Image (cartoon, helix red, strand yellow):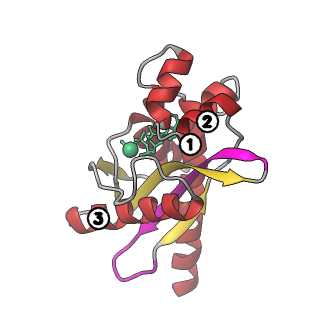
Amino acid sequence: MIIAIGSKNKAKIKAVENTFRELNMEVSVLSLESPSGVSPQPFSDEETMKGAANRAEFCLHQMEEADIAIGLEGGVTETPFGLFLCNWGALAESGKETLFAGGARIKLPGDIAERLRAGEELGPVMDAYSKMQGIRHKEGAIGVFTHGLVDRAAMFSHITKLLIGQYEKLKGSSN
Ligand SMILES: O=P(O)(O)OP(=O)(O)OP(=O)(O)OC[C@H]1O[C@@H](n2cnc3c(O)ncnc32)[C@H](O)[C@@H]1O
Ligand SMILES: [Mg+2]
């Protein structure tokens, strides 16, 4: 099976590769930078979901050899309890309805939330906060704020499992 992923982000690619390895599924993983079609910093679940679906669908259309395509998108969402990280995944297959899965969410500290509300992007804000470069390709904000217990790859890996599980379930019931 050939799986395409709509991003060149290392944490996302690693998450998908690790998941298939863990599930003992023999697949080839290809990656293609795919536009999310939403703002660089999505600010709601809806916008983040749309970004994930757009990436998956774009990637599927571009990569003819792919059986399925996965789009993973990071965003933030306002709640009555503050601004939370939110992450979504979408799985596209030709002729089928796109599948969705959401990831773990945690509250961002107030000073980080304020900078995002003022229009900054989480990636650079996190680099400045952690005094590291390219944190979005590594542990990500979720890794920083969970003391490394759940990093960005682990979080996207869980989303990937939720997607593949739904895909396998539907495949099984159509046989
Ligand atoms: O190359 P792509 O796939 O676009 O990967 P990305 O890291 O930019 O990830 P997203 O577009 O999905 O994320 C949207 C924005 O949120 C930022 N972001 C999301 N989650 C993050 C995290 O865990 N740590 C740091 N930045 C994050 C990211 O830098 C973007 O500005
Ligand atoms: Mg991006």
What amino acid does circle 2 point to? Glu
Q: Nearer the viewer, residue 127 or 73?
A: 127
Q: Local crowd at mark 1 within 10 Å, few (<14), some, or many (≥20)?
A: few
Question: Do residues under tags 1 and 2 come within 8 Å of each other at their CB atoms?
Answer: yes
Residue shown at the point (51%, 71%) measured from the top left? 99
Q: Quadrant of ligand 1?
A: top left
Q: Is mark 3 within 8 Å of ligand 1?
A: no
Among the 4 quarters of the image, the one containing residue 88 = bottom right
- Residue matched to label 3: 58
Q: Residue furthest top?
A: 131
Is residue 90 located in the magenta-colored stretch of the structure?
Answer: yes
Q: Give how far apart the Cα atoms at labels 1 and 2 are.
A: 5 Å
Circle 2 is placed at which residue position? 114
Q: Nearer the viewer, residue 63 or 43?
A: 43
> Which residue is label 1 attached to?
117
Q: In the displayed structure, does residue 155 sit left or right of residue 71?
A: right
Task: Give coordinates of residue 101: x percent, y percent.
Answer: 58, 62
User: Is residue 8 among the parts visible in the rendering?
Assistant: yes
Residue 138 makes an appearance in the image: no
- What residue is at 62 percent from the left and 25 percent from the top? 144
Name the mark nearer the viewer: 1 or 3.
Answer: 1
Sooner in the amino-acid sequence: mark 1 or mark 3: 3
